[in-house]
Image (tube, helix red, strand yellow):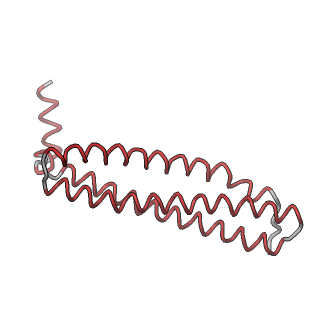
Amino acid sequence: MAELSINTPALLFPAITLLMLAYTNRFLALASLVRRLHEQYNKEESQNIRRQIASLHVRIRLIRNMQALGVLSFLLCVVTMYLIFIGNTHAAYVLFAMSLISLLLSLIFSLIEIWKSTTAINLELSDMELKHQNIIRVILDDKEKE
């Protein structure tokens, strides 16, 4: 088994911190979208808005899980460094492995959320005329008009 130094879990600190910042930005963007959809829903109820709201429920749960697993990974890294510091290497190995698994699961949830968000964007575009046209033809027509 490779030696686990205090530097190993410390290397994850910047990555996890940046990941948490990205997750928070995704959450804030979704919160803004929810507020906008709520206003639209109160003005007019449509099938498209209902589908978007259902998609947002799933995406918000995914982001909550992403954030929770990211925080858990961060906490486990901190405890791992403490265990290395006091010399309890066996427990440090176990907790560091758990930290990596938490980070991996967080990234998997992130991948699923990204997949769902592209589906949501396509749902947003579904009632637009552009989607039903040949996109290359639309771009070429726009260039000819200039």
Q: Residue furthest top?
A: 146
Question: Which residue shows up at 73% across the image and 58% down it?
Answer: 78
Q: For the N terminus, give its image quadrant.
A: bottom right
Q: For the C terminus, give its image quadrant.
A: top left
Question: Which residue shows up at 43% across the image and 48% down it?
Answer: 26
Q: Position of residue 91 (x, y in %)?
A: 79, 73
Q: Is residue 47 left or right of residue 15?
A: left
Q: Is residue 106 left or right of residue 85?
A: left
Q: Position of residue 20 (x, y in %)?
A: 55, 51
Question: Which residue shows up at 39% across the image and 44% down it?
Answer: 29
Q: State whether residue 61 is above or below residue 121.
A: below
Q: Position of residue 94 (x, y in %)?
A: 73, 74
Q: Residue furthest right?
A: 87
Q: Nearer the viewer, residue 102 or 45?
A: 45
State the count of labels.
0
Q: Is residue 50 left or right of residue 84?
A: left
Question: Which residue shows up at 65% across the image and 58% down it?
Answer: 74
Specify the quadrant of the image occupied by residue 111. bottom left
Q: Position of residue 113 (x, y in %)?
A: 40, 59
